[in-house]
Every structure is written in C-alpha cells, then in structure tokens.
Image (cartoon, grey):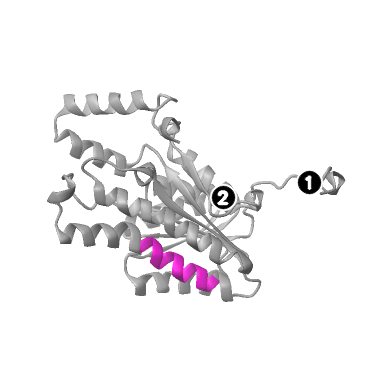
Amino acid sequence: MNRESYIGRETMAMSLEGKVAIITGASSGIGRATAVVFARERAKVVLAARRISEGEKVAKEIQAAGGTALFVLADVSRAEEVKALIAQTVSKYGRLDCAVNNAAAIWNEQKRTGDFSEQDFDREVNGNLKSVWLCLRSELEQMRTQDSPGGTIVNVSSVNGLGGAPGAAFYSMAKAGILALTKAAAMEYTAEGIRVNALVAGTFDTPMLSTALERAAGGDAERLKTIEERFLSMVPLRRIGRPEEAAEAAAWLCSDASSYVTGHSMIVDGGLTAWAR
C-alpha cells in the first residue's frame, strides 16, 4: 500500500453529531451514562427502560442540558415491545444509526450450577441474552433496509462472560452468549455497512453492582466491606470503574473513529482480567 495515500489524512474524531441512537437499560448505571455521553456528542438519543420515572428523569436531564432525548417504556425481553421501540424511534427521528444493547439485570440468587431450576435458566436467558438478540434482530433489519443503509451496534457483555463465576453460572452463560452473537452478526452484516461490537464490562459503580455485593454479603456490613476490599485488590487500577468510562468506550465503538473495528470484544475492566488474556 502506498504510504502517501493516507499521510496527512484528517484524523476521524469521535463525533456522533446528528446520529440517531437507541440505548437500552438507560434509566441508570452504564446505560444512563451512555445516553448522557451520546447526547454530549450531539446524537439524538432514544432511552429505553422498564422504569418510567427514572427513564423520563434522565431524558429531561439531557434535554435541560441542551441535548435531544426521547424516553420509550420498553421491556426488551418482549419481541413486540422491541419492535415498538424501533418503530417509535424511526417515527420520531426518521432512521436508526447506533444502538447500545445494555439492558441487563441480576435475575437469580447465587447458587451452585446443579442447584438452579429450569425457571432460573429461562429467566436468565430471557432477561440477559434473548433480550439482546431481540434488539439486535430488529436493529439489523432497520439499519439494513432504511435509506442510506448502515449503522453501528454495541452489545454490552461482562467479564463474567469470558470465563465463569462461582454462584452465577447462568449469568456467565448469558454474557458469553452475547459475545458469540456479536461476532457472528459482525461477520454477516459487513456488506450492508453495519458494524457490531461488544463492550465487555468489568466492575462499575452501578446499582446492579451494589445489588450483587449486598446479596453476596447477606446483609452483613462487615462482610460487605471485606468483599469490596477483595474486589479492589483484584483490579490493577485499584478502583471501581465510573459508568462514564464504559460509556466513552461505547461511544467510540459507535463513532466513525472506530470505522475499521467490527466483531471486537472491547474489555473495559481496569485490568481485572489482564492476567488471563
């Protein structure tokens, strides 16, 4: 390749100006931070969540800061609600350019693998894996068939999906499934101008983390403190991540600055899994 062909070429900035983006699980945590960062980058943001008051509050905060945001009530584990979410987005803004499939929850109490029930399995798959696939399916269809086809999708996984987590086998299974789903879709839709990547999240200061830690501690304040200290000792950066740090990575993956990146699992975990990679 001729080196002169790209010497002096302008560096592509992480701009999402004018892009229409859906963020699921946007009422708190990483989803909320992602919606705020996308709005800061001048994207038109559609926030999807199951909690009305929290979701509307985030949308109003974005609007008050000069951003463009719309809240849509949606349980993304239900196909009809996902289709309605896409339809409302396109009705309001005309197209879909970006999506961050972030919605997730802790569905089961910690148990050993053989102690889970079929109901536990179905709950975890529906809430943390099927939901991502339902969103991905509808987003791909919209991006593929709209005028000026194309777009970028980020599926949010977890470092638990890179291996296993004692007491949370089904959660790890669901998050591993997201990674495989992402890679397959990335290879299938490149010809239609669609990039698909995964954000592999480590430990972030979110309500979901607080819930997990409190469950693990069983209401014991001293045990909770011990668990938190053990977590910190495992992270080379010696701190819990800020949701905004995950959001910045998602924004980069959806921007033109990452135009040569697809099928990638971007690990954002403060070095937690560096020893095993």
Task: Give the magenta part as a residue range.
Answer: 131-142
Q: Which residue is mark 2?
A: 253
- The residue under label 2 is which amino acid type? Leu
- Local secondary structure at mark 1: loop
Q: Is residue 136 left or right of residue 175?
A: right
Query: What is the CA distance from the residue labelled 1 to the residue labelled 2?
Result: 19 Å
Image position, residue 150 (x, y; %):
61, 66
Task: Identify the residue shown where x is 78% and y is 46%.
Answer: 10
Main SS class of the magenta portion in the image? helix
Image position, residue 85 (x, y; %):
43, 69
Task: Identify the residue shown where x is 34% and y is 23%.
Answer: 233
Q: Is residue 251 visible?
A: yes
Q: Is residue 98 visible?
A: no
Q: Which residue is mark 1?
A: 10
Task: Identify the residue shown where x is 28% and y is 60%.
Answer: 125
Q: Is residue 275 left or right of residue 111?
A: right
Quick one: label 1 or label 2, which is nearer the N terminus?
1
- The residue under label 1 is which amino acid type? Glu
